[in-house]
Amino acid sequence: MDLCFDDPDAIQTALCILISSPALQELEIFMDDRKKLTRSPGVVEQQNSSCFEVSYNCTFYQLRLVNITRISGVEAELDFIKCILLGSPLLERMTVTPASMDGFTKLVKELLQLKRESKHAAIILMDP
């Protein structure tokens, strides 16, 4: 799944697809930063936040493996990851590959502090 976090409609669509896929066991997400919208960041952040507030109640009962590529660490991406971690009781491994080394230390701290539903879920950080 290619996902652009500058587009609240794309985020909502992705969440709807995930919620509508109860048998989903593996998920691969490619953060698409090539599709930048021409909205102001404040509006995008505000809309992204409202997308996730509604979706924290979803559960992905079969999801076991998640691979996320090109994450930059913006709040909307972390909220999306939090949604997956909180809604996946059987998650075994989430592999995260950042887009660059810029902000890598901060990203590591943010990801390791996220709560998760699965007690066995490991977050693996790869080099960009």
Image: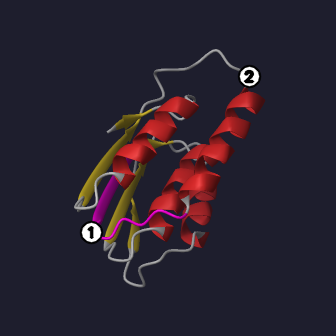
Q: Which is more foreground, mark 1 or mark 2? A: 1
Quadrant showing the N terminus: top left
Mark 1, other Cα within 10 Å: few <14 / some 14–19 / many ≥20: some
Residue located at (54% from left, 61% from top): 82
Query: Residue flagged by tag 2: what amino acid is it?
Result: Ser
Extreme residue toward the top, this view: 38
Q: Can residue 125 be seen in this view?
A: yes
| Residue numbers of the magenta segment | 57-69
User: Circle 2 is placed at which residue position?
Assistant: 40
Residue located at (49% from left, 56% from top): 81
- In the rendered image, residue 58, in percent from the top left (x then y), is placed at 47, 62
- Is residue 10 positioned above or below 76 on the image? above
| Residue 37 - label | none
Identify the image quadrant of residue 69: top left
Quadrant showing the C terminus: top left
- Is residue 65 positioned above or below 50 on the image? below
Marker count (numbered): 2
Q: Is residue 74 visible?
A: no
User: Circle 1 is placed at which residue position?
Assistant: 62
Extreme residue toward the bottom, this view: 119
**Magenta stretch: residue 66 in it?**
yes
